[in-house]
Amino acid sequence: MEAKTDTKTGEVKYGYAKYLRDALPNASFIGFTGTPIESEDKSTPAVFGHYIDVYDMTRAVEDEATVKIYYENRVIKLESDDEELKKIDEEFEEITEGQEENEKEKNKSKWSRLEAVVGSPNRIKKLALDIVNHYEEKSKTIDGKAMIVCMSRRICVDLYDAIIKLRPDWHSDDLDKGKIKIVMTGSARDEERLQKHIGGKQRRDTLAKRMKDNGDELKIVIVRDMWLTGFDVPSMHTMYIDKPMKGHNLIQAISRVNRVFKDKAGGVIVDYLGILESLKKALNEYTDNDRKNTGIDTSAAVMVMQEKLEILQNIMHEFDYSDYMGTSQVARIRAITGGMNFILGKPEKEQKEFKQIAVELAKAHSLCAATTEGRECALEVSYFKAVKASLTKLQEKKVQKKSKKEIEERVNQMLQRSIISEEVIDVFDVMGMERPDISILSEEFLEEIKNIKYKNLAAEMLKKLLEGNIKTMERKNLVKSEKFSEKLKKALNKYRNQAITNVEVIEELLKMAKEMKKDAENEKDLGMNEDEIAFYYALTADDAVKQFMEDDVLKKIAHELTRAIRRNVTIDWSVRKSAQAGMRRIIKRLLKKYDYPPEQAKNALKTVMRQAELMCGNVESYEYYEEVAENEGEYRV
């Protein structure tokens, strides 16, 4: 809208905005903005009017599209005489980014004076030490990335040099290696010490790719202006700010750490220069909720952590886990298994509560791990995390296989940690047992489980083994899996309702394990394949059938049923009514042919049909039976 005059010709020129307004005088102006501007000479609401709708940061957190941002004050005092500091304090609010060129020129001297004090060698040394300690403490609770924001390229390089002096192994001249890098632009005129950190688009793209890959060793970048807007690294959990910023530039910058990622509970802004007032002013342009829920002091996370820790301490007050706080690895593992056993002895509702509170504790601690309070209780927090994680591993229905990349990330994370990690333990490993197949269990193994000191753990281990075996049965033998599933359910219900003790439930589960083992041995004597055995179980689901029929006859029916179903299976037969009707006719004919008891025939027909659906319910079976059908002609519908 502004008019610009050519001083040589006297011609006045306008921008496109004026011509659009002239052409469309009655138009409504609608704008979309993530960071509204409200300053003396620029105002988003003034141009576009009142907000039609607002989707603020608070709603984004509620929708789990972003995470909360926490504020941590670690201001390092500026070193200068009182008079100089007074001048700097007065000028501080005037120094901003995103100014017009004439404003930049006007403030250049002020910026230089502040930059000299902020970048003093002694302060840089303190800053480097604090960042290294803070990041390493944080890394013990969460794996991810961090960004350091400095006010000049000189300070970026000085800080980098100070950090790698403390941690030489973080440095590498190779662009594809190293834990820390500087991202900045420059020119051939820049001094030599800056040159090795300056690069074009290709260098920035390589570093961006590495930064976005959480498995890459690059964990920290130092920037001045680069990557403060529009650069998303979901695993970035901390931003260290040592640069005066305000307004929408500050909001855009801190939003780098609010992306959702795995177990990340929130992003943390670490303030080294005193930007809290600027942050409050910037948030005034946003909603009331955002002002309350952005830049939350980490003391809030400390309070949550202490509250959750106290709840878990109360839950575990009857169990002594102090051995975990010592140095013996064996004692620590004993404390974890004992804790698992203690929790497993509680009602299911309390077990769930323990695991949920442990998750909430871990999240709160990850936000304040570098604080004094966070460091003091780090080992106790890791204990509760270990018990929770080990319980989850023991009770999970399906073992989650880790990808190669996840394994590499985990190994890297473990190598970087210097204190006891809250490792997940496998109770079978701890007890010195391999995770066996129930069907081939030895009496010695069952006796070993029976004699385990921790009875609740023993019951949980047996339950897991039995569930795994039943899961395998479900894919092959319907009747057998349902029989044992029902038995297991009844035994566990009695245990959970405290109708039987942990010793008694172990006896019942051991009895079931032995029954499974005996069934597996008996099946070998039948002289039939898996499919025939499954139909044999379907035919004898009612125990009364064996009273009326010879075993050899039942085996023959099972054999002929298998052949008939193989001949008539199609990949969609279970949904085609005509095909199902044809299958029923074949089954009825076979049952009648061998004088199957009429009273049991109706239920047998249903069970055999269900077993047939299970048998033919996968592509591999279908392809196999289709091949068999080419060579057999009997029992065709």
Image: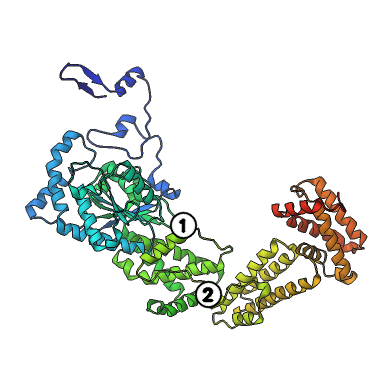
Position in image of residue 285 (x %, y %): 30, 41
Q: Which residue is mark 2?
A: 429
Quick check: marks 1 and 2 in contact, CB under 8 Å?
Answer: no
Say how many tags the image has: 2
- Relative height, residue 559 to residue 488 (above, below): above
- Residue depicted at 13% across the width and 45% down the height: 112
- The residue type indicated by label 1 comes to Lys
Per the model, the C-alpha gap separating discs 1 and 2 is 24 Å
Q: Nearer the viewer, residue 292 or 332?
A: 332
Q: Is residue 318 at least partly visible in the picture?
A: no
Residue 570 visible, this angle: yes
Q: Which secondary structure, mark 1?
A: helix
Q: Which mark is residue 453?
A: none
Q: Is residue 493 left or right of residue 258?
A: right
| Neighbourhood count class around disc 2 (C-alpha, 10 Å): few under 14, some 14–19, many 20 upward | few
Label 2 sits on what residue type?
Asp
Q: Earlier in the sequence, mark 1 or mark 2?
A: 1
Q: In which quadrant of the rendered view does residue 110 lie? A: top left
Horizontal side of residue 109 vs 329, given as left or right: left
* Residue 405, disc: 1
| 586 or 102: nearer the viewer | 586
